[in-house]
Image (spheres, rainbow, N blue to C red):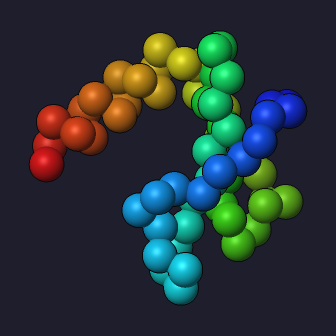
Amino acid sequence: MIEQSWRKSRRSASAAQCVELAVTDAVTGVRDTKNRDGGTLIFRARAFRAFLAEVKSAR
């Protein structure tokens, strides 16, 4: 499990669907802000960077 500080997405509104990230050099964890005990998605750092690049390119 990731033992880092979780931070809420800057693009999440207070009443909307929100996610939190915990980033390390090796992995990125993603979880639902409203259901923190509901599970965490873990991505290898390289895969998560590729995902973000793809999302940003689709703007």
Please, is residue 1 above or below residue 44 in the view?
below
In this figure, what is the number of numbered marks?
0
Please, is residue 39 above or below residue 5 in the view?
below
- Looking at the picture, tell me which residue is in the foreground, 10 or 35: 10
Residue 7 in the image, given as x and y percentages of width and height:
65, 51
Residue 33 in the image, given as x and y percentages of width and height:
68, 65
Residue at point 62% right, 45% down?
A: 21
Please, is residue 52 above or below residue 39 in the view?
above
Toward the bottom, the furthest residue is 15
Q: Is residue 22 left or right of residue 44?
A: right
Please, is residue 58 above or below residue 36 in the view?
above
Choose top left, top right, bottom left or bottom right for residue 34. Answer: bottom right
Residue 35 in the image, given as x and y percentages of width and height:
75, 68
- Looking at the picture, tell me which residue is in the foreground, 11 or 30: 11
Residue at point 77% right, 51% down?
A: 39
Choose top left, top right, bottom left or bottom right for residue 1. Answer: top right
Q: Is residue 32 left or right of residue 9?
A: right
Q: Is residue 3 left or right of residue 16?
A: right
Residue at point 55% right, 67% down?
A: 18
Residue 59 in the image, given as x and y percentages of width and height:
13, 48
